[in-house]
Amino acid sequence: MAPGPDVVYPTRYITVEYELYLKDGTLVDRGEFVYRQGFGHVHPRIEDALEGKRVGDEAVVELSPEEGFGEFREDLVREIPRSEFGNVPLVPGKVLYMREEETGEPIAMSILEVKEDTVLVDFNHPLAGEWVRYVLRIKDVGLRPPPGYVCDDKGCRRQKPSGSCDTC
């Protein structure tokens, strides 16, 4: 028998408010997201921590660099000819996006330094190498998706060309 309607349970749509902290306690992000429990749409440690909780409950999930945003990799810091950027304004600290050639997936790069003929960029995630702590609060649990929810499950067999699917 399924638990009450306000309990996080597989196939339900969960609205979560979160705060993301570095190991030293620095708040780096806060916001809200919606996902479908049990479908692998969020980190497995987050799904596990929220399973069985109710609306209003909180959970804390700490992730090592390996579990979270990856270790910092020096090989992802590269010099690219300035001419590759065309007329794009190049400012250290700015994040630019490009498409991966084979898959078309977006890739972010941070500009570290602008030189006369080259640009030093970093393809690491901005939180690579960091231990992080999520403080999560369950805002809502539903049997149906909330208004505006779009399924982003690339493996969904029912996905329409619009990006949504019939069940998510």
Image: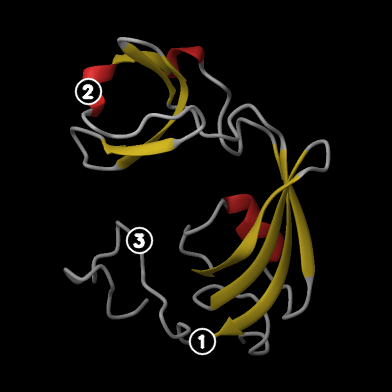
Q: Which residue is at a point 56% across and 51% down the rendered structure image? A: 43
Q: For numbered disc 3, what is the local secondary structure? A: loop
Q: Which residue is at a point 54% across and 72% down the rendered structure image? A: 10
For the residues marked 3 and 1, what is the alpha-carbon distance in whole angstroms?
Answer: 18 Å
For mark 2, what is the residue? 84
At which x and y percent is residue 85? 25, 27
* Quadrant in which the C terminus is drawn: bottom left
For the residues marked 1 and 2, what is the alpha-carbon distance in whole angstroms?
Answer: 48 Å
Residue 36 can be seen, yes or no: no
For mark 1, what is the residue? 143
Q: Earlier in the sequence, mark 3 or mark 1?
A: 1
Q: Is residue 110 above or below residue 11?
A: above
At which x and y percent is residue 90? 38, 29
**Between 165 and 90, the one nearer to me in the picture:** 90
Marks 1 and 2: which is nearer the front? 2
Amino acid on which the number 2 mark rests in the picture: Glu
Amino acid on which the number 3 mark rests in the picture: Asp
Dot 3, how many residues are within 10 Å of its Cα: few (below 14), some (14-19), or many (20+)? some
Left or right: where 68 falls relative to 138: left
Q: Which residue is at a point 71% across and 34% down the rendered structure image? A: 131
For mark 3, what is the residue? 153
